[in-house]
């Protein structure tokens, strides 16, 4: 997968990453949730995102693109993602799935937070091997977005994931520690 356009979330203000209360950063991020052309590389969630941030030295630097109503990506887990020798840590695999679902939100066109993430590890996810990923929205029930994804090697599906995300507005991120009194908004 080739490089990506910087997108509106990388306007310099985004370099401060998560926790920046700047309304301009949040508005730039919200603006990313617009129509993206078929096969277009999608912008990173922000420059320091653990899943897709190009400036995060510990991250995965996942690049996803639109594929119909879903998203696809390719990923190679590196030594920094190791669990058992030669195998990606299950948490690293979960991070990639969670971030892939985050890219799916661009296609859905709404901000949302993870409510539930379930992963079936079907085979070891090996370091240094290229994996194809695909995610789709399977259902929408009010604010609940149900999604599914799979990770495949060149020969087999190695992991599958299902998630429920809860749609929120941009103010959810301006004060993440404020008690909202609505359990559905907590990630």
Image (cartoon, rainbow, N blue to C red):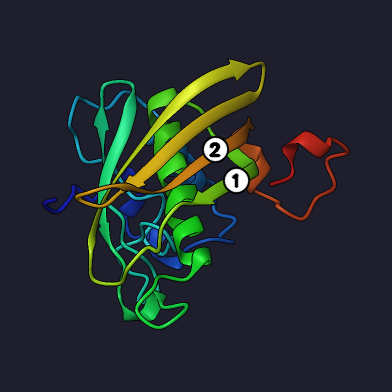
Q: Which residue is mark 1?
A: 118
Q: On the rendered structure, is 120 left or right of 155?
A: right
Q: Are marks 2 and 1 in contact (CB under 8 Å)?
A: yes
175 relative to 34, above or below? below
Bin the neighbour count of mark 2 within 10 Å (Cα to Cα): few under 14, some 14-19, many 20 and up.
Answer: many
Residue 92's spot in the image, x, y percent?
46, 65
As drawn, the residue found furthest toward the left would be 2
Can you tell which quarter of the image residue 93 is in?
bottom left
Can you tell which quarter of the image residue 143 is in?
top right
Q: Which mark is residue 127?
A: none
Can you tell which quarter of the image residue 96 is in?
bottom left
From this viewpoint, is residue 40 visible?
yes
Q: Determine the residue positioned at 31% across, 61% down.
A: 61
Residue 62's spot in the image, x, y percent?
31, 55
Q: Which mark is residue 162?
A: 2
From this viewpoint, is residue 25 visible?
no
129 relative to 147, above or below? below
Q: Determine the residue positioned at 41% across, 49% down.
A: 45
Q: Determine the residue positioned at 45% across, 49% down.
A: 97
Residue 18's spot in the image, x, y percent?
53, 61
Bin the neighbour count of mark 1 within 10 Å (Cα to Cα): few under 14, some 14-19, many 20 and up.
Answer: some
């Amino acid at each position: 997968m080739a490089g990506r356009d910087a997108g509106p979330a990388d306007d310099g203000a985004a370099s401060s990453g998560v926790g920046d209360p700047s309304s301009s950063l949040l508005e730039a991020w919200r603006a990313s949730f617009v129509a993206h052309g078929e096969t277009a590389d999608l912008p990173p969630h922000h420059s320091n995102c653990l899943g897709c941030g190009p400036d995060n030295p510990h991250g995965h630097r996942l690049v996803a693109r639109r594929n119909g109503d879903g998203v696809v990506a390719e990923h190679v887990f590196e030594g920094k993602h190791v669990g058992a020798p030669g195998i990606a840590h299950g948490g690293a695999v979960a991070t990639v799935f969670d971030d892939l679902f985050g890219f799916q939100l661009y296609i859905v066109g709404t901000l949302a937070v993870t409510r539930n993430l379930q992963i079936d590890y079907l085979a070891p996810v090996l370091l240094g091997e290229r994996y194809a990923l695909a995610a789709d929205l399977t259902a929408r029930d009010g604010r609940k977005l149900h999604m599914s994804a799979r990770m495949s090697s060149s020969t087999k599906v190695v992991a599958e994931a299902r998630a429920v995300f809860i749609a929120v507005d941009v103010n959810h991120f301006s004060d993440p520690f404020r008690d909202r009194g609505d359990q559905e908004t907590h990630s």
